[in-house]
Amino acid sequence: MSEGLIALGIEDLGLNLGPENIADLDIFLHEMGRWNQVHNLTAIEGESESIKLHLIDSIAVLPVMRRFLEGPNPLIADLGSGGGLPAIPIAILQPEWRLTLIEAVRKKTAFLQHIRGKLKLHNITVLSERVEVVAVQQSGVFDAVISRAFTNLARFLELSLPLLKPNGLVFAMKSKRADEEMQDVNLSQWQLIADIPLHIPHTTVERRLLVLSPIKISPTLSE
Ligand SMILES: C[S@@+](CC[C@H](N)C(=O)[O-])C[C@H]1O[C@@H](n2cnc3c(N)ncnc32)[C@H](O)[C@@H]1O
């Protein structure tokens, strides 16, 4: 299957992938296809080409994340991980980053735990919880939050805020509807740091990665 990923242009993303990386991504795809048949894990339908494109979509964000994340071992939450996109491919390619996958549906987290064991991904933690619950339990601990196909931008930001450290970053994977969704964002609370078009090899799909950060509210002098 590696030839398939290579043919789809995975090497054009400029990530310098080694053969072990591609082999692990292949295992992930293979297991997702296998579990999907039995457990109906994702809405991604049978065609393996389409599953591969979803994977490439997920790792196209990496060069931007590398540019913005400081520190050697950032802690990143993936909200509504589903079958593991984008967190699993990111965890495979960035073993020094720590990822927490938050997913409410148990059969999906069972799959994520299976992948964790199969690929020995010691840098991921899988939480079978609603994001709203984790936000209370793990408030202010994450360097960054990411999601793909989770919810609209304003709701994603609302759910991310309690999870983030004060200087934390939100990476929002969006398509051309991003401008529309930005109109609902409270710009007194959030700063748009970057809006970066992503190139998905051999496709014309439009993808953008928005990078946002909460605006610090400075303490006001008491009157
Ligand atoms: C459309 S799927 C996207 C899955 C994956 N991110 C992807 O790109 O393939 C959205 C996922 O978010 C999960 N989800 C929705 N609301 C949630 C919440 N409040 N807390 C945790 N998971 C949630 C759903 O169970 C579902 O698996």
Image: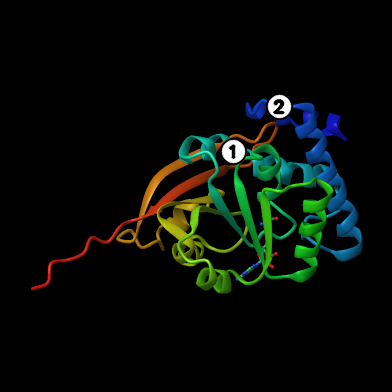
Q: Nearer the viewer, residue 125 or 149?
A: 125
The quadrant where ligand 1 appears is bottom right
Please provide percent x and percent y for residue 83.
Answer: 75, 57
Q: Position of residue 87 (x, y in %)?
A: 66, 50
**Which of the 4 image quadrants contains residue 201?**
top right
Q: Is disc 2 in contact with disc 1, using a CB cutoff of under 8 Å? A: no
Q: Alpha-carbon neighbours of circle 2 within 10 Å: few (<14), some, or many (≥20)?
A: some
- Where is residue 43, by image quadrant? bottom right
Task: Please indicate whether residue 49 sits to the left or right of residue 184 in the image.
Answer: right
Q: Amino acid at mark 2?
A: Glu
Nearest the eye: 1 or 166: 166
Report if the beta carbon of the residue with label 2 is closer than 8 angstroms to ligand 1.
no
The relative height of residue 11 versus residue 145 in the rendered view (above or below) is: above
Q: CA distance from mark 2 to mark 1?
A: 13 Å
Q: Quadrant of residue 6?
A: top right
Residue 63 position in % (x across, y down): 56, 34
Rendered image: mark on residue 29: none
Left or right of residue 16, residue 215 in this image: left
207, above or below 215, in the image: above
Q: Which residue is mark 2?
A: 11
Residue 215 versus residue 70 in the image, above or below = below
| Visible residue check, residue 173 | no
Residue 47 relative to residue 187: left or right:
right
Question: Could one spot residue 195 in this view of the protein?
Answer: yes
**What residue sits right under mark 1 in the picture?**
62
User: What sort of colour scheme is used for the picture?
Assistant: rainbow
Whether disc 1's CB lies below 8 Å from ligand 1 is answered no
Taking depth in this image into account, of 185 and 193 the one nearest to the observer is: 193
Identified by mark 1, the residue type is Leu
Where in the figure is residue 137, as x and y percent of width and height? 54, 71
- Residue at screen point 82% across, 56% down: 114
